[in-house]
Amino acid sequence: MTVFVLGGAQTDFARNFAKEGGGLYEMLAEVVPDALVDAQVEPGDVGVAHVANLAAELFTGQAHLGGLLMAAIPDLDGVPSVRHEAACASGGTAVLAASADIESGRYHVALVTGLELMRNTDSRSAAEHLGSAAWVGEEAQTAEFPWPALFSDVADVYDWRYGLDLAHLGLFARNAFANAALNPMAQTRDWSFPDGSFDQDDRLNPVVAGVLRKNDCGRISDGAAAIVLASPEFAADWAKLVGRDLAEVPKLTGFGHRTAHLSLRGKLERAEGHEYLFPHLRGAVVDAYWRAKVSGAEEIDVVELHDCFTITALVALEHLGAAPPGAAGRLIESGGIARDGVLPVNPGGGLLGLGHPVGATGVRMVHDAARQVAGTAGPLQIDGVRNVLTLNVGGSFTTVVAMVVAR
């Protein structure tokens, strides 16, 4: 697998598009031209487009987003386009589909964009809409907020298996928000956190569901991201044209994609007796390492990790091999995930700090990973990055997409 990432863009995830009088159309009209400019590619070069989104029908009443893309970007009119939905992994699956289009030889350039408008309604309605990615009518039926409730259940199972120190969740959140403070596109970049904000403080950090508190949970976000992918043939000609060294251009070198039972209970039942809490998650990461010819986490320089909740991140760290099962908390406590740690995690703030417009997240991860590899991440840059792992998760670890971005 060699698919080049020529460039990309994202909107400011702190913006509330509905308050600005805008929506999905305006997001596309902004982010796609920015991505094409960053990639130094003309609209006429694009052979195929992929759009990622979870719940536009529920939040806005709008479906058929492939056509909305053409309305927003008239110069793309006639380009084949399709929409992808895999809950919070919608973006990751869109990137994989676009990569497959390129690898098949059908197209040489693919545009991938992901977007979500979620701040146009109240928090309860938003939670209900997002709950459609769980098994409706079968789980979280009495929960006020379905996803915090389900991931609190994950925390309970983790605690039963290994023992869970809630202070480790707070330390992860503290690191995420500190990284986001450096990111000019982060939703929380200007937020302040008084002492106690990451502790078991019912005033500053109230309980949302079970053991999960306010700062353990990702926020409702608006936003879009887009990237431009290319074949080796197109990238070689492009590099000569724009004066780039092709060896320094980021590329997708490996992927893993697995899907498990829709319900959390269904997954946990199938994991009984396994070393890992979610064997398919571990399998997707191992697939990505194998395809990228990477031995494991020891060869990864940065991780773009799906931290919709702090417990999601703790579990994911173990499944990617950064720590043995049950030991991720100690890695966090040691500072291992910090910018100067052994494995920097989410230098831009991740879903917790940067924001989580659901359909955009998987695309944004690849965009940020490519910037790290290219050395163009500005204040977020980690020195000496060669391999970045992205781990995009949909539902209660139902859909998992892992990718290695390298140079």
Image (tube, rainbow, N blue to C red):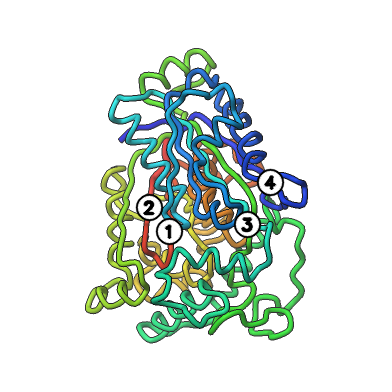
Gap in angstroms between the C-alphas marked 4 and 1: 22 Å
Question: Residue tagged by mark 1?
Answer: 393
At mark 2, the secondary structure is strand
Mark 4: amino acid: Asp
Q: Are the residues flagged by discs 3 and 1 in contact, CB closer than 8 Å?
A: no
Tell me if mark 4 has few (under 14), some (14-19) or many (20+) residues whose alpha carbon lies within 10 angstroms of its own.
Answer: some
Q: Residue at x 43, y 38 (%)?
A: 82
Q: Quadrant of residue 354?
A: bottom right
Residue 303 in the image: state x and y as whole percent.
47, 53
Q: Which residue is under mark 4? A: 12
Contact (Cβ within 8 Å) of mark 1 with mark 2: yes
Q: Which residue is mark 3?
A: 118
Q: Amino acid at mark 2?
A: Val
Mark 4 vs 1, N-terminal side: 4
Q: Is residue 339 above or below residue 388?
A: below
For the residues labelled 2 and 4, the Cα–Cα distance comes to: 24 Å
* Secondary element at image label 3: loop
- Identity of the residue drawn at 54% across and 53% down: 57
Mark 2 sits on what residue? 401
- 403 or 107: nearer the eye? 107
Q: Secondary structure at mark 1?
A: strand
Indicate which disc, 3 or 1, sits on the residue closer to the N terminus. 3
* Mark closer to the chain start, 4 or 3: 4
Location of residue 332 in the rendering, given as x and y in whole percent from the top left corner: 51, 69
The quadrant in which residue 58 appears is: bottom right
- Among all residues in the image, which is located at the extreme front? 61
| Label 2 crowd (10 A; few <14 / some 14-19 / many >=20) | many
Question: Mark 3 is on which residue type?
Answer: Met
**Residue at the (53%, 68%) spot, across then down:** 309
